[in-house]
Image (cartoon, rainbow, N blue to C red):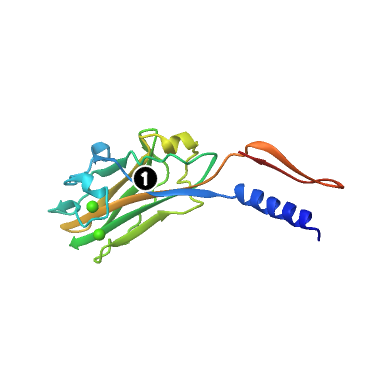
Amino acid sequence: MKSKDIFRMIVAVVLLLIVLGANEGPKNGGTFGNDTINAGDFSWVNPSNAGASDDVYTTITENFSGLSYYLKATNFNFSSVSGTIDGIVVEFEKKRVTGTGYDGEVLLVKNGTIQGNNLGTTTPWPLTESYVTYGSAYEKWGLLWNASDITASDFGVVISYQGETATSARIDHIRIIVYYTPPLGKRHRIFSDAGMIEEHRRE
Ligand SMILES: [Ca+2]
Ligand SMILES: [Ca+2]
C-alpha cells in the first residue's frame, strides 16, 4: 500500500471517530433547595451541601414513616453538550444513618419542570456511603431532549426519600454525566485516484 493510501485510511478513521458519541461530566449542581410540589412531610437541611463530595452533607430526619420533599439540584453548568442527547446518568453519594428508607422518586428537571420517568427504586439506601447510579449512556428518562435543555441553568434532578420507619439519611454529593452525539458539520470528502472513497460530515 502506498504511503498516500495509508494516510488516507488514517484520515478516514479519525473522521469516523469524530462522529461517534461523546460525554460531558460528571458535573456538580450549583443551585439546591427543597421543592414541596410532591407534598412530602420532611425537609432537607442544608441542601447546597450536595454540591461537592466533601463529607459535608444535606440531611433528612423523619420522626415517623413518611416522604421527604424533593431535594432539587439544578444549574449543572453543562457547556459542551451538543447534537443528539443519547443518555443521562445521575449519581448520588448517599447513606442511610438510622432506620429504614429508600427512594421516594428520582426524576429529572427539564426546562424547570420535574418530569419524565421515575428511576427511583425501593432498594434501601446503603449503610455505607457510596455513589448510587441512575440512568445510563442510553437512558433518556422517558423524555425528548435538545442540547439546549441540558445546557440551560434550569436542567437538573430531584430525589425524595421514603422512610419505612422513623429514619435519617444524608447525601454528600449529586453529579450528572450527559452522553451525546455531536452534530454533523460541513461535508468532507476523501478522494483517491479512482474517485471518492469516503464521505463524512464534520464540524
Ligand atoms: Ca463522601
Ligand atoms: Ca457534600
Q: Is residue 101 shown left or right of residue 24?
A: left
- Residue 71 position, x and y percent, is 26, 45
Residue 43, picture quadrant: top left
Label 1 CB sits under 8 Å from any ligand 2 atom: no
Residue at the left extreme, as displayed: 63
- Residue 58 position, x and y percent, is 20, 50
- Residue pointed to by mark 1: 107
Residue at the bottom extreme, as displayed: 128
Seen from the viewer's position, the closer of residues 174 and 118 is 174
Residue 84, picture quadrant: top right
Q: Secondary structure at mark 1?
A: strand
Q: Is residue 45 shown left or right of residue 7?
A: left
Q: Amino acid at mark 1?
A: Leu
Residue sitting at 27 percent across and 55 percent down? 53
- Residue 91 position, x and y percent, is 35, 54
Residue sitting at 49 percent across and 37 percent down? 147
For disc 1, the neighbor class at 10 Å (few under 14, some 14 to 19, many from 20) is many
Q: Quadrant of the C terminus?
A: top right
Q: Is residue 73 shown left or right of residue 99?
A: right
Residue at the front extreme, as displayed: 3
Q: How many marks?
A: 1
Seen from the viewer's position, the closer of residues 55 and 168 is 55
Residue 186, picture quadrant: top right
Ligand 1 found in image quarter: bottom left
Q: Quadrant of the N terminus?
A: bottom right
